[in-house]
Image (cartoon, helix red, strand yellow):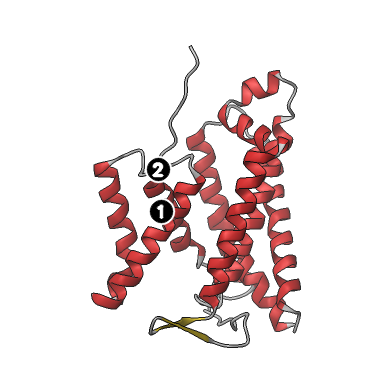
């Protein structure tokens, strides 16, 4: 939401799209770092549930602040490309979908490369799996966690800014996208980034087909129906990572 709102405000000032994307992503990344430093890092004896409740509260607060400082109206954002639509196999869709698909693939590849092929990425995974063991090996766990918040804020802001021309920008636009992102993780399997990407693709295609062949009124319902079905059939997700335990 913040990425889309900041991009909208910058584009109103006639800034180029590339610069507005970079600025909005950087600002949200800094906000994510502040959230970690001011709230997450200072919470003593925190459990996963307490941190989840805290971040939900922070999210509600941010939405309220944006609603007051900007407004609560829905604002259109012009597509990034000069042409508005693309025709493929007799199907016509917004040119912004090309940007969304391309950006998703690029970001997924960069994130995969960072986590799997770089030392800092492997350290981040180690901290995620066992922060105590990582701390005993001399890793600055707080710095790594703060870096993960910064990366999450940057990617989240880019996602919000890129999706803005398809979905109107408003203070509460992140709620449904967040829920569908959670559904995609459940379908793909937690702990598997590639699975989450495929889960999102499955949900997206199913939503589009349901909107075209049934009714657009049920489009948002499809994601959660698929999630519930997967939980019944395979609770760990379709592509869940296998936990390896050393004895």
The percent coordinates of residue 75 (x first, y second) are 56, 81
The answer to whether any part of residue 128 appears in the image is yes
Residue 16 located left or right of residue 181: right
Q: Which residue is mark 1?
A: 199
Q: Which residue is mark 2?
A: 239
Mark count? 2
The residue drawn where x is 24% and y is 43% is: 232
The residue drawn where x is 58% and y is 27% is: 45
**Which image quarter holds the N terminus?**
bottom right
Compare residues 2 and 215 and report the one nearer the observer: 215
The percent coordinates of residue 149 (x first, y second) are 65, 46
The kind of secondary structure element at disc 2 is loop
The residue drawn where x is 70% and y is 41% is: 146
Examine the rendered structure and indicate whether residue 8 appears above or below residue 235: below
Q: Residues within 10 Å of mark 2 (few under 14, many from 20)?
A: many
Residue 163 located left or right of residue 11: left
The residue drawn where x is 25% and y is 76% is: 213
Q: Residues within 10 Å of mark 1 (few under 14, many from 20)?
A: many
Compare residues 121 and 147 and report the one nearer the observer: 121
The percent coordinates of residue 39 (x first, y second) are 65, 42
């Amino acid at each position: 939401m913040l990425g889309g709102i900041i991009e909208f405000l910058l584009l109103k000032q006639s800034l180029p799209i590339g610069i507005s994307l970079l600025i909005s992503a950087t600002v949200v990344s800094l906000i994510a770092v502040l959230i970690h430093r001011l709230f997450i890092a200072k919470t003593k004896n925190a459990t996963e549930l307490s941190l989840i409740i805290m971040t939900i509260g922070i999210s509600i607060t941010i939405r309220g602040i944006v609603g007051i400082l900007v407004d609560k109206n829905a604002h259109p954002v012009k597509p990034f490309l000069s042409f508005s639509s693309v025709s493929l196999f007799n199907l016509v869709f917004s040119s912004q979908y090309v940007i969304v698909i391309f950006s998703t693939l690029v970001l997924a590849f960069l994130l995969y490369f960072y986590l799997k092929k770089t030392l800092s990425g492997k350290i981040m995974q180690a901290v995620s799996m066992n922060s105590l063991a990582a701390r005993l090996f001399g890793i600055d766990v707080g710095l790594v966690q703060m870096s993960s918040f910064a990366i999450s804020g940057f990617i989240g802001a880019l996602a919000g800014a890129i999706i803005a021309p398809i979905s109107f920008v408003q203070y509460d636009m992140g709620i449904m996208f967040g829920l569908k992102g959670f559904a995609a993780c459940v379908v793909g399997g937690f702990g598997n980034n590639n699975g989450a990407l495929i889960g999102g693709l499955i949900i997206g295609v199913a939503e589009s087909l349901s909107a075209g062949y049934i009714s657009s009124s049920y489009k948002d319902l499809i994601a959660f129906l698929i999630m519930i079905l997967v939980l019944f059939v395979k609770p760990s997700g379709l592509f869940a990572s296998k936990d390896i335990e050393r004895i």
